[in-house]
Image: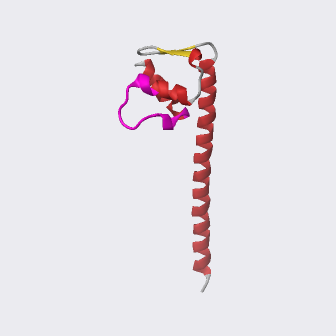
Amino acid sequence: MNNDINFLDRYSILAPNAIPQGFADGKVVTEKILLALQLDPAEYRLGNTKVFFKAGVLGMLEEMRDERLGKIISMFQAHIRGYLVRKQYKKLQDQRYDFIP
């Protein structure tokens, strides 16, 4: 598997607006993601098929990714909980109206 594509798969979540619609060159999209994250160009180098990071940068990207995923999952859980509560409330309301003559 191409490491550039692997980078896109893992870190595109950090800068979804930086990715153009449709097919784009992996190297170009990778560079756009890194620029959107405001990483110092001295901290990384782009090869033809790989991204090279200085020590600690990849760990920082992983922490940013974990934080972003945590926020997305929390938001998703909140929406699901809200849906389930509204569904239960509607069920209780329907039962309540069934008892009214």
Whether residue 43 is in magenta: the answer is no
Residue 36 image point, x, y percent? 54, 31
Q: Report the front residue among 14 and 73.
A: 14
Colouring used for the render: secondary structure
Determine the residue positioned at 61% across, 56% down. Answer: 82
Determine the residue positioned at 62% across, 76% down. Answer: 96
Determine the residue positioned at 61% across, 19% down. Answer: 57
Q: Report the front residue among 91 and 75.
A: 75
Q: Quadrant of the N terminus?
A: top left
Q: Quadrant of the C terminus?
A: bottom right
The correct choice, above or below, for 1 with respect to 77 in the image is above
Give the number of marks.
Answer: 0
Q: Horizontal placement of 23 versus 14: left or right?
A: left
Q: What is the residue that sits farthest to the left in this orientation? A: 23
Residue 39 image point, x, y percent? 59, 23
Whether residue 18 is in magenta: the answer is yes
The correct choice, above or below, for 86 with respect to 54 in the image is below
The correct choice, above or below, for 11 with respect to 79 in the image is above
Determine the residue positioned at 60% across, 36% down. Answer: 68
Give the quadrant of residue 64. top right
Magenta segment: 14-29
Residue 3 image point, x, y percent? 45, 18
Residue 12 image point, x, y percent? 50, 31
Q: Report the front residue among 85 and 34.
A: 34
Q: Report the front residue among 18 and 97.
A: 18
